[in-house]
Image: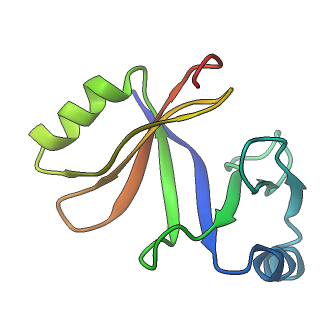
Amino acid sequence: MPRVVHFDISADQPERALKFYTKAFDWQFSKWDGPFDYWLIRTGVEEEPGIDGGMGVRSNPDAGITSIINVPSVDEYAARVVAAGGTILAPKQAIPGVGYLVNCKDTEGNGFAIMEDDEYAA
């Protein structure tokens, strides 16, 4: 069963947001070594329940916090999202060295993303 495995925060000023979440929640940030500016967020220790996330520069004015659901195939699950009444907001995109991502919206207008792990994504 696909699970939420990551969250993504969109920020107009990532450095400002980083300071906020560090001060408010003691989250730890580390710069991702990838092809675009992105920070990985550690929200706690592995022994405790919860998930970690990431933060990047806001790509559109409606972007906020997005839950990311891990699926075995974004193509298959994108079709399932549409069949269930959801919408695909952005086509499949590769995140190099990580996998494939598809941004979606549910029947209530809530945004989320589905992610297929693939270290060879390019």
Work out whether 71 lies above or below 31. Answer: above
Residue 111 located left or right of residue 78 = right
Which quadrant holds residue 74? top left
How many numbered discs, if any?
0
Residue extending farthest to the top is: 120
Residue at 83% x, 76% y: name it.
Answer: 15
Work out whether 32 lies above or below 62. Answer: above
Residue 99 located left or right of residue 53 = left
Residue at 75% x, 56% y: name it.
Answer: 37
Question: Quarter holding the C terminus?
Answer: top right
Residue at 68% x, 50% y: name it.
Answer: 50
Residue 39 located left or right of residue 62 = right
Image coords of residue 68 (percent x, y): 50, 47
Question: Quarter holding the N terminus?
Answer: top left
Work out whether 76 lies above or below 47. Answer: above
Image coords of residue 115 (percent x, y): 48, 35
Image coords of residue 95 (percent x, y): 59, 36
Question: Nearest the camera: 111 or 100?
Answer: 100
Residue at 89% x, 60% y: name it.
Answer: 28
> How did the renderer colour the structure?
rainbow
Image coords of residue 70 (percent x, y): 49, 33
